[in-house]
Image (tube, rainbow, N blue to C red):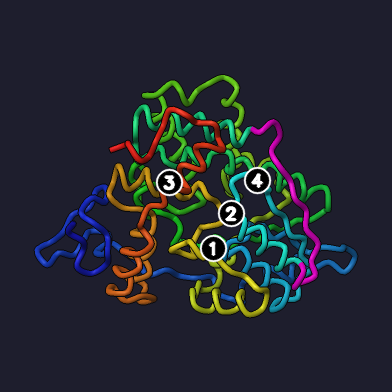
Amino acid sequence: MNRCSKCVLPESMPNIFLDKEGVCNYCHAYQKLKYKGEGELLKFLDSYRRADSKYDCIVTISGGRDSTYTLLKLVKDYNMKVLAVNYENPFTDPQAIVNIHNTIKSLNVDIVRFKLNNKIHERIFANNVTAWFQRPSPGLVPMMCIACKTLWWEISKIAKKYNIHCVVSGGNRFEQVSFKKVLLHTSADEKAETTLIKELFGILKETSKNPVYFKPQFIPSLVKGYLFGNPYALGSRLLGHNVVGIDLFFFIEWKEQEVISRIKSEVGWDYPSQSDSNWRFDCRIGHMKDFMYMRTLGMTERDDFYSKMVREGLMKREDALHRLQKENRLHLGHIQQLLSEAVIKDISPFSTR
């Protein structure tokens, strides 16, 4: 497979064009990330410190590397009084659960956990996987995660209950996958604050080709998912109009080695020994998404992630290629286990081409 000679995007990347030197249009159009700065972050956090309250803010934690680092950073470096909030995802990797326990204990913070009722997460996943295999589409791979897009609804309610007005998450702009936006007819450099409504129309256009996605019992969750898909979504702003959500790495630079080093040494964080990557292992549905993207595009989200790191000067191209060779390997055993847990009997990744 041919790849961009500057980053590592493959020729199968949607809307990619290579010039005479083999450099892709994404590299030509790329603009270096700009950060608001730690000074602005501290001003923001200081405005939410409250002597009369038990908590200054919420940090959402999944057991993955970035949410763990965010909690560590706010507690140890910024001395914020934090309430950790965790969604008990039925597909959470066991190591992520261990990480959450170790982190909460090490930092001595309180945690609120919540679940979705009536096994709605498992049921939506089973339905959407079945729908996807009937009509594979790379643009609809994010539908595997639609249940998690409803979480800001629950987080906003927890914030109101504990009279908290600030929620800090560990998302960063390297994770805003360019090809997801392109596949849903949105600009690759669209900002997070404005992309959701445009992606919604793209999702509706794609799902309209496959009515299996629109079973009546799942429509409320679909609607809620795109009303509360992130802190900038319409529902999040209305329900949590006095709750402000920010992402740590929109203010300060994300440095992979620092993140991994600190969470390992200070809170005992780790990732599964059988995993090839320390990124996004916390939800096992990631294995299914990798399979779907590899089948339809011949790449995964990591190709886009590492390409951005190369452009930012945070990773050498040779290192990115080496990591992709290792980390893009499919774990069919994990995928088969997911299908079994979701009681999906008519699909086998081993026989799908």
Of labels 1 and 3, the one closer to you: 1
Q: Residues within 10 Å of mark 3 (few under 14, many from 20)?
A: many
Whether 129 is drawn above or below 279: the answer is: above
Structural distance between the alpha carbons of marks 1 and 3:
18 Å
- Sooner in the amino-acid sequence: mark 2 or mark 1: 2
Q: Above or below — where is 244 with respect to 324?
A: above
- The 10 Å Cα crowd at callout 1, few under 14, some 14 to 19, many 20 or more, is some
User: Along the polypeptide, which appears first: circle 3 or circle 4?
Assistant: 4
Q: Quadrant of the N terminus?
A: bottom left
Q: Name the residue carrying label 1.
A: 272
Q: Is residue 343 left or right of residue 265?
A: left
Which label is found at residue 289?
3
Q: As shown in the figure, which amino acid type bears the numbered disc 4?
A: Trp
- Which residue sits at x=68%, y=62%? 100
Judge depth for marks 4 and 1 and give the one in front.
1
Magenta stretch?
105-119
Q: Nearer the viewer, mark 2 or mark 3?
A: 2
Asked if the magenta segment contains residue 199, the reply would be: no
Residue that badge 2 annotates: 93
Q: Nearer the viewer, residue 221 or 129?
A: 129
